[in-house]
Amino acid sequence: MKKNSFRGRCIVCFLLIGGIFTVIGCGSNPKIHTPAESVKTWEAALQYLTDGNKRFVGNNGITRNTNKKDRDVLTKDGQKPFAVIITCADSRVAPEIYFDQKLGDIFVIRNAGNITDATVLGSIEYAVEHLHSPLVVVVGHSKCGAVTGALSADGHFPHNLQTIIKTISGNISGISELDEAIKKNINSTVDRIKENEIVKEENAKVIGAHYNIETGVVTFFE
């Protein structure tokens, strides 16, 4: 696969093994995204996310002492998020935290069950077309309550929540095991986003990922 060099001595190789992206060979001085930087490739964007998750898991997060400077840049020059993250609204899975990112780094869309509807797709279209984010990642997570609800045969939910459960149920039709259903729900969302005309026109890369709430590790896959 393609190799990319970054500032410092970080060289990364992306391997696709069994449908899972594995990132190897990253040095000890990874590059940190700055608000003024426009990221052109999905590979570079994915590297920012993998580096950030490694920092989070290793309790070695960046020092956020540039808030005033970052706000000034983002106010003057606008935002340049390098990735779009669609993930669950669960309070345990905030992507800015588990990817160890700052203001202006990622364009986040959250709802229960990390599903797509017209508003989600419209938000993605804005990010990839107007903000030029090259990477879209759908992140599901372990022990997802929304997917658990969709697997419940006798579950009773309020009207609006039932709309979410119905969408997930359609995504995981025929599946009864929770972990398998969580992955299928991720992949179903990825497939729908890939079919979006704006996403295709902008040649944005769309991948799925899974966040383990116990270990903090994010695994990327297609």
Image (cartoon, rainbow, N blue to C red):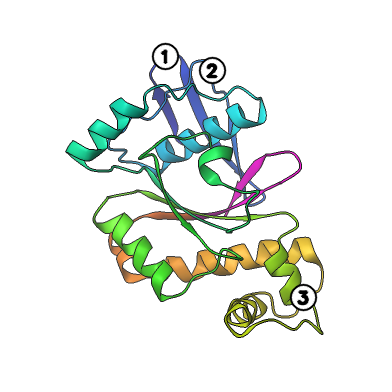
Q: In which quarter of the image is residue 4?
A: top left
Residue 204 colored in magenta in the image: no
> Disc 1 vs disc 3: Cβ atoms closer than 8 Å?
no
- Residue type at tag 2: Gly
Mark earlier in primary sequence (2, 3): 2
Q: In which quarter of the image is residue 215?
A: top right
The residues tagged by marks 1 and 3 sit, at their Cα atoms, a distance apart of 47 Å
Position in image of residue 39 (x %, y %): 32, 38
Where, quadrant-wise, is the C terminus in this rendering? Answer: bottom right
Foreground pick, 174 / 96: 96
Position in image of residue 54 (x %, y %): 61, 30
Q: Which mark is residue 27?
A: 2
> Disc 2 vs disc 1: Cβ atoms closer than 8 Å?
yes
Left or right of 55? Residue 153 is: right
- Disc 2 crowd rating (10 Å Cα; few below 14, some 14-19, many 20+) is some
Q: Mark 3 points at which residue?
A: 151
Position in image of residue 189 (x %, y %): 54, 67
The residues tagged by marks 2 and 3 sit, at their Cα atoms, a distance apart of 42 Å
Identify the secondary structure beneath mark 1: loop
Q: Mark 1 points at which residue?
A: 8
Q: In which quarter of the image is residue 164?
A: bottom right
- Residue type at tag 3: Leu
Numbered disc in front, either 1 or 3:
3
Numbered disc in front, either 2 or 3:
3
Residue 85 in the image: above or below residue 126: above
Q: Give the range drawn in magenta.
A: 207-222
